[in-house]
Structures are given as C-alpha cells and as structure tokens.
C-alpha cells in the first residue's frame, strides 16, 4: 500500500502540474493573410491569431510574443496586431513586441512562459 502511494503521488503531481516552461507554441501570420480585409467579425477567424489566443487561454502564466520585420511597415503591422489581441481579450501586459523577424512577409507569434519570453 505504501509503495502504491509513493508511486501515485508523483504521477498525480506530474499530471496536475501547469504547462511546462519549455512548452512554446509558434504560429506564423503571413502578409498575404494580413492583406485580407480585417474587422471584428473576421479577425477571430485568422488561423494563427485564433490558435495563439486558444493556447494562451489554456496555459498558465503565458504571454504572446510578436516578432515582426524590422522596418516601419513591420512595426505598424505588429502594433495593429497587438491592438487586435487586446480587443479579443488578451491584456496588453501579456503581449511582447520584438523587432527582427527573419522574413519580411511574416510575423511570428510565440506563446510561452511569460518570464522566459521577457528575457
């Protein structure tokens, strides 16, 4: 009986523990998709945006990092995307903007542990 408890307790802790700090999810939003008309009815249907929000809602203590192309148009794109995240319920302090995407036609969304993403 004692052996069963010694095995069961660590298993329960493992199953009930929050999402691991190493569980990052990466989503991409291309310029072609972004070029489509945007409205409050359409934005929740953008695949990368919806997937990022869904994962953010399920995981504990997570944030969304928006890595965007470094030029002015990339910064404008990222700022508008941040505003859409906020309008869809993500608090602004859970959104991190980072310049330097390697692809000029794509924004990368990284959802993961808030402390790790802020480093």
Image: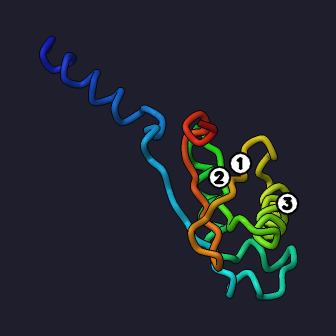
Q: Is residue 106 above or below residue 35?
A: above
Give the secondary structure at mark 3.
helix
Label 2 near label 1: C-beta < 8 Å?
yes
- Mark 3 or 1 closer to N-term? 3
The residue carrying mark 1 is 96
Task: Name the foreground residue: 44 vs 106.
Answer: 106
- Mark 1 or 2 closer to N-term? 2
The residue carrying mark 2 is 65
Residue drawn at (72%, 53%) of the image: 97
User: For the residues marked 1 and 2, what is the alpha-carbon distance in whole angstroms?
Assistant: 5 Å
Badge number at residue 83: 3
User: For the residues marked 3 and 2, what is the alpha-carbon distance in whole angstroms?
Assistant: 13 Å
Horizontally, residue 102 falls left or right of residue 94, namely: left
Quarter location, residue 81: bottom right
10 Å crowding of disc 2: few (<14), some (14-19), many (20+): many
Residue drawn at (42%, 33%) of the image: 16
Q: Is residue 16 above or below residue 73?
A: above
- Mark 3 or 2 closer to N-term? 2
Q: Is residue 94 above or below residue 28?
A: above
Give the secondary structure at mark 1.
strand
Task: Name the foreground residue: 100 vs 43.
Answer: 100
Residue drawn at (83%, 61%) of the image: 79
Image spot of residue 26 (x, y percent): 52, 61
Horizontally, residue 2 falls left or right of residue 48, namely: left
10 Å crowding of disc 3: few (<14), some (14-19), many (20+): some
Image spot of residue 34 (x, y percent): 74, 81
């Amino acid at each position: 009986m004692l052996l069963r408890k010694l095995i069961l307790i660590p298993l329960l802790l493992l199953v009930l523990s929050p999402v691991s700090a190493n569980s990052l999810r990466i989503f991409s939003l291309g310029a072609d998709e972004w070029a489509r008309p945007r409205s409050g009815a359409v934005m929740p249907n953008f695949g990368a945006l919806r997937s990022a929000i869904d994962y953010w809602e399920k995981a504990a203590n997570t944030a969304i990092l928006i890595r965007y192309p470094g030029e002015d148009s990339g910064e404008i794109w990222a700022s508008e995307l941040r505003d859409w995240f906020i309008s869809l319920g993500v608090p602004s302090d859970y959104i991190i903007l980072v310049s330097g995407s390697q692809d000029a036609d794509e924004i990368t969304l990284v959802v993961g542990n808030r402390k790790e993403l802020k480093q």
